[in-house]
Amino acid sequence: MAPRLANLKIRKMSATQLISKFKVYEPSERDSLGTVASLIPKGKLKFIPNTIKKYQDKINQAIGIILINQAGESTTLPLSKRVSKGIVDAFEAGADKKKLLSAIAKLEVTQFEHNKTGKMCQVVSAPVGEAGTEEEYTVADLGESTVSFEELI
Protein backbone atom coordinates (compact mmCIF):
# COMPACT_ATOMS: atom_id res chain seq x y z
CA MET A 1 0.00 0.00 0.00
CA ALA A 2 1.29 3.47 -0.83
CA PRO A 3 2.69 5.36 2.20
CA ARG A 4 0.18 8.20 1.93
CA LEU A 5 -2.68 5.70 2.12
CA ALA A 6 -1.22 3.76 5.04
CA ASN A 7 -2.51 6.25 7.62
CA LEU A 8 -5.92 6.63 6.02
CA LYS A 9 -8.75 5.96 8.47
CA ILE A 10 -11.89 4.43 7.05
CA ARG A 11 -15.21 4.66 8.83
CA LYS A 12 -17.93 2.13 8.08
CA MET A 13 -21.19 3.69 6.88
CA SER A 14 -24.48 2.11 5.98
CA ALA A 15 -26.19 2.30 2.59
CA THR A 16 -28.76 4.68 4.12
CA GLN A 17 -25.96 7.23 4.48
CA LEU A 18 -25.35 7.52 0.74
CA ILE A 19 -25.53 11.11 -0.50
CA SER A 20 -27.88 10.11 -3.32
CA LYS A 21 -30.75 7.96 -2.08
CA PHE A 22 -31.74 4.84 -3.97
CA LYS A 23 -34.55 5.30 -6.48
CA VAL A 24 -35.39 3.98 -9.92
CA TYR A 25 -32.94 5.48 -12.42
CA GLU A 26 -34.65 7.46 -15.13
CA PRO A 27 -32.50 9.30 -17.65
CA SER A 28 -33.45 12.88 -18.24
CA GLU A 29 -35.40 13.41 -21.42
CA ARG A 30 -33.62 15.24 -24.18
CA ASP A 31 -34.99 16.34 -27.49
CA SER A 32 -32.60 16.44 -30.42
CA LEU A 33 -32.98 19.53 -32.59
CA GLY A 34 -30.54 18.14 -35.17
CA THR A 35 -26.85 18.54 -35.76
CA VAL A 36 -25.20 21.93 -35.62
CA ALA A 37 -24.56 21.72 -39.37
CA SER A 38 -28.21 20.89 -40.14
CA LEU A 39 -29.36 23.98 -38.23
CA ILE A 40 -27.12 26.30 -40.29
CA PRO A 41 -26.61 24.46 -43.62
CA LYS A 42 -25.15 27.48 -45.43
CA GLY A 43 -24.07 29.36 -42.35
CA LYS A 44 -20.90 29.81 -40.33
CA LEU A 45 -19.62 28.57 -37.01
CA LYS A 46 -17.02 30.00 -34.65
CA PHE A 47 -15.87 29.81 -31.05
CA ILE A 48 -16.55 32.52 -28.50
CA PRO A 49 -12.84 33.04 -27.67
CA ASN A 50 -13.17 34.35 -24.13
CA THR A 51 -15.21 31.27 -23.11
CA ILE A 52 -12.22 29.05 -23.89
CA LYS A 53 -9.95 31.13 -21.66
CA LYS A 54 -12.59 31.27 -18.91
CA TYR A 55 -13.02 27.47 -19.15
CA GLN A 56 -9.27 26.98 -18.83
CA ASP A 57 -9.24 29.35 -15.83
CA LYS A 58 -12.13 27.34 -14.29
CA ILE A 59 -14.50 30.33 -14.42
CA ASN A 60 -16.92 28.80 -16.96
CA GLN A 61 -18.04 25.19 -17.08
CA ALA A 62 -18.57 25.25 -20.83
CA ILE A 63 -17.21 26.70 -24.05
CA GLY A 64 -19.57 28.73 -26.21
CA ILE A 65 -19.95 28.79 -29.98
CA ILE A 66 -21.64 31.24 -32.33
CA LEU A 67 -23.90 29.92 -35.09
CA ILE A 68 -24.47 32.32 -37.97
CA ASN A 69 -27.18 31.55 -40.50
CA GLN A 70 -27.15 32.42 -44.21
CA ALA A 71 -28.94 35.73 -43.54
CA GLY A 72 -26.13 36.78 -41.17
CA GLU A 73 -28.22 36.39 -38.01
CA SER A 74 -26.48 34.71 -35.11
CA THR A 75 -27.15 32.86 -31.90
CA THR A 76 -24.91 31.30 -29.28
CA LEU A 77 -24.91 27.84 -27.75
CA PRO A 78 -22.83 26.27 -25.01
CA LEU A 79 -21.02 22.99 -25.54
CA SER A 80 -21.74 20.31 -22.96
CA LYS A 81 -19.19 19.87 -20.18
CA ARG A 82 -17.92 16.67 -21.80
CA VAL A 83 -17.56 18.24 -25.25
CA SER A 84 -15.96 21.39 -23.76
CA LYS A 85 -13.34 19.29 -21.99
CA GLY A 86 -12.60 17.39 -25.19
CA ILE A 87 -12.21 20.61 -27.17
CA VAL A 88 -9.88 22.21 -24.61
CA ASP A 89 -7.80 19.02 -24.40
CA ALA A 90 -7.57 18.97 -28.21
CA PHE A 91 -6.54 22.66 -28.32
CA GLU A 92 -3.84 21.99 -25.73
CA ALA A 93 -2.62 19.05 -27.84
CA GLY A 94 -2.26 21.39 -30.83
CA ALA A 95 -5.42 20.54 -32.78
CA ASP A 96 -6.45 22.84 -35.61
CA LYS A 97 -9.40 25.14 -34.83
CA LYS A 98 -11.02 24.41 -38.21
CA LYS A 99 -10.94 20.65 -37.57
CA LEU A 100 -12.45 21.12 -34.12
CA LEU A 101 -15.27 23.25 -35.51
CA SER A 102 -15.83 20.60 -38.17
CA ALA A 103 -16.23 17.98 -35.44
CA ILE A 104 -18.62 20.24 -33.49
CA ALA A 105 -20.73 20.76 -36.62
CA LYS A 106 -21.45 17.01 -36.61
CA LEU A 107 -22.66 17.01 -32.99
CA GLU A 108 -26.29 17.39 -32.04
CA VAL A 109 -28.07 20.23 -30.35
CA THR A 110 -30.25 18.87 -27.57
CA GLN A 111 -32.94 20.59 -25.57
CA PHE A 112 -33.85 19.56 -22.04
CA GLU A 113 -35.30 20.86 -18.80
CA HIS A 114 -32.55 21.99 -16.41
CA ASN A 115 -32.76 19.82 -13.29
CA LYS A 116 -32.17 22.75 -10.90
CA THR A 117 -33.90 25.72 -12.52
CA GLY A 118 -36.65 23.93 -14.41
CA LYS A 119 -35.93 26.14 -17.44
CA MET A 120 -35.50 24.72 -20.93
CA CYS A 121 -31.86 24.66 -22.05
CA GLN A 122 -30.14 23.92 -25.33
CA VAL A 123 -26.61 22.56 -25.56
CA VAL A 124 -24.30 21.02 -28.14
CA SER A 125 -23.62 17.50 -26.96
CA ALA A 126 -22.14 14.20 -27.98
CA PRO A 127 -24.72 11.67 -29.16
CA VAL A 128 -26.87 10.42 -26.30
CA GLY A 129 -27.39 6.65 -26.26
CA GLU A 130 -30.53 4.83 -25.34
CA ALA A 131 -30.97 4.38 -21.60
CA GLY A 132 -30.33 0.91 -20.27
CA THR A 133 -28.60 -0.47 -23.37
CA GLU A 134 -25.36 -1.07 -21.52
CA GLU A 135 -25.11 -4.61 -20.18
CA GLU A 136 -25.79 -4.84 -16.48
CA TYR A 137 -24.34 -7.30 -13.98
CA THR A 138 -25.44 -8.43 -10.55
CA VAL A 139 -23.12 -7.80 -7.62
CA ALA A 140 -22.73 -11.59 -7.30
CA ASP A 141 -21.56 -11.82 -10.94
CA LEU A 142 -19.00 -9.10 -10.35
CA GLY A 143 -17.74 -10.82 -7.20
CA GLU A 144 -16.65 -13.76 -9.34
CA SER A 145 -14.37 -11.50 -11.40
CA THR A 146 -10.65 -12.24 -11.20
CA VAL A 147 -9.40 -8.73 -12.00
CA SER A 148 -7.80 -6.93 -9.07
CA PHE A 149 -7.83 -3.19 -8.49
CA GLU A 150 -4.07 -3.05 -9.04
CA GLU A 151 -4.53 -4.64 -12.49
CA LEU A 152 -7.01 -1.94 -13.44
CA ILE A 153 -4.50 0.82 -12.74
Image (cartoon, grey):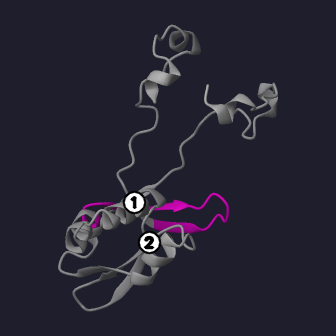
Earlier-in-chain disc, 1 versus 2 = 2
Q: Residue at image x 27%, y 92%? A: 72
Q: Secondary structure at mark 2?
A: loop
Residue 150 percent coordinates (x, y):
49, 23
Residue 128 percent coordinates (x, y):
39, 48
Say which amino acid is labelled 1. Val
Residue ranking furthest to the bottom: 72
In the rendered view, tell whether residue 10 sits above or below residue 90.
above
Q: Residue at image x 30%, y 62%? A: 93
- The residue tagged 1 is 83
The local crowd at label 1, few if under 14, some if 14 to 19, many if 20 or more residues have their Cα within 10 Å, is: some
Which residues fall within the magenta stretch? 104-122
Which quadrant of the figure contains the N terminus? top right
Residue 31 percent coordinates (x, y):
43, 57
Q: Is residue 5 left or right of residue 148?
A: right
Q: Residue at image x 46%, y 77%? A: 53
Residue 44 percent coordinates (x, y):
23, 81
**Res 107 → quadrant:** bottom left
Say which amino acid is labelled 2. Ile
Q: Residue at image x 63%, y 57%? A: 115
- The residue tagged 2 is 63
Q: Is residue 44 magenta?
A: no
**Res 82 → quadrant:** bottom left
Q: Is residue 86 left or right of residue 121?
A: left
Q: Are marks 1 and 2 in contact (CB under 8 Å)?
A: yes
